[in-house]
Amino acid sequence: MPFNQKEWRTRPEIKEKIKLQMREWRRKNKDKRKLYRERYYNKYKGLEKETWLIRTYNITQEQYDTMLKEQNYVCAFPPCGKRIEINGKSLSVDHDHDCCSGSKSCGKCIRGILCQSHNSAVRSLEFHLWAQEYINKYKKR
């Protein structure tokens, strides 16, 4: 007996029954699920990163790749020179938090692509400089 969505959400016994049915179906259809995941991955490979770049930093994958190429695939922090891994795990887009507060950027204030350790260091330095200004402001009173 099919259940409508409203029933499914409001009646815990129905929710539990559907959950058990889904678990059983997944157990019996491992090959189908694997095939689906492979097809989905191949179809949408790379789109998650593209969407994330646009939503978070307001840049496209093409702009990101161009920046990375201009940096010769190394961290943009001058003394570092660490080769940036292309797998996406050690890449951080650095932007000016004074322009765009928080983790999102307008896209115009991007300074470069850094290794994770230097991105954290730059963010920490920005905070310490802000804190120093804040402390100095109140010392003058």
Image (spheres, helix red, strand yellow):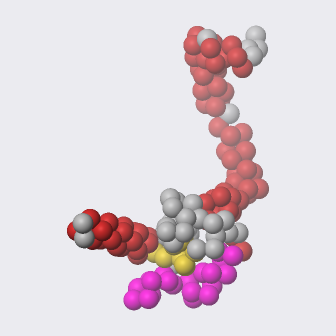
Query: x, y (%) of residue 6?
Result: 70, 17
Closer to us: 15 or 66? 66
Number of numbered discs present? 0
Residue drawn at 66 percent across, 77 percent down: 65
Q: Is residue 65 magenta?
A: yes
Residue drawn at 60 percent across, 26 percent down: 23
Q: Is residue 117 above or below residue 27?
A: below
Q: Where, by quadrant of the figure, is residue 29 drawn?
A: top right
Report if residue 135 is visible in the image.
no
Q: Is residue 129 above or below residue 52?
A: below
Query: x, y (%) of residue 60?
Result: 70, 69
Closer to us: 11 or 101? 101
Q: Where, by quadrant of the figure, is residue 93 drawn?
A: bottom right
Query: x, y (%) of residue 36?
Result: 73, 44
Residue drawn at 61 percent across, 17 percent down: 15
Residue furthest front in the image:
141
Q: Where, by quadrant of the figure, is residue 11 drawn?
A: top right
Report if residue 32 is visible in the image.
yes
Part of the protein shown in magenta: 63-82
Residue drawn at 57 percent across, 16 percent down: 16
The quarter of the rendered structure image containing the C terminus is bottom left
The quarter of the rendered structure image containing the N terminus is top right
Closer to us: 60 or 111? 111
Is 126 on the left or on the right of 87, as rendered?
A: left
Q: Main secondary structure of the magenta part?
A: loop
Is 2 on the left or on the right of 91, as rendered?
A: right
Query: x, y (%) of residue 72?
Result: 57, 88
